[in-house]
Amino acid sequence: MAFRTLLYRYFFFGWLFQDVNRGNVIERAAAWRHNRAQARWLPTYMRRWLWCGVVFYGMGGFFEMLLNAPGLSVLFYVPSALSVPVNAVIGAAWVGLKVLPAQV
């Protein structure tokens, strides 16, 4: 597998899930069960994004405070800030798939 693909799969979880809006009722129910089973990986993705956000925030603080380069620190603060909405989306998906009762 190419490194690009591995890196994508390390940070993004869309490849784990199936489309629930395709096929007949039986296929949709099977896709829903599959997605609920795959939701166990979502906390792992949340931890990955959390740690990346913390590391980037720390690097931004390092560049801003210690090296006195606020312009360069933006390159680290922005990905740190973007990790927050990504974690919110992952959390909402996890709650929808794992915590709420089945709807199919």
Image (spheres, rainbow, N blue to C red):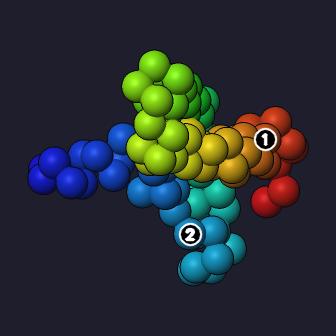
Q: Is residue 51 left or right of residue 28?
A: left
Q: Is residue 101 left or right of residue 79?
A: right
Three-letter code, disc 2:
Asp
* Mark 1 secondary-structure assignment: helix
Q: Farthest residue toward the top?
A: 66
CA gap between label 2 and label 1 equals 18 Å
Frontmost residue, 38 versus 51: 51
Q: Residue at x 63, y 44 (%)?
A: 81
* Quadrant placement of the C terminus: bottom right
* Mark 2 secondary-structure assignment: loop
Name the image quarter holding residue 67: top left
- Residue 73: x %, y % from top left: 48, 39
- Residue 91: x %, y % from top left: 72, 41
- Residue 20: x %, y % from top left: 63, 69
* Front tag of 2 and 1: 1
Q: Residue at x 33, y 52 (%)?
A: 8
Frontmost residue, 39 versus 51: 51
Q: Is residue 41 above or below residue 26?
A: above
Q: Is residue 9 left or right of residue 36?
A: left
Frontmost residue, 94 versus 24: 94
For disc 2, the neighbor class at 10 Å (few under 14, some 14 to 19, many from 20) is few
Q: Farthest residue toward the left?
A: 2
Residue 19 numbered tag: 2
For disc 1, the neighbor class at 10 Å (few under 14, some 14 to 19, many from 20) is some
- The residue tagged 1 is 95
Frontmost residue, 81 versus 92: 81
Three-letter code, disc 1:
Val
Q: Residue at x 42, y 57 (%)?
A: 15
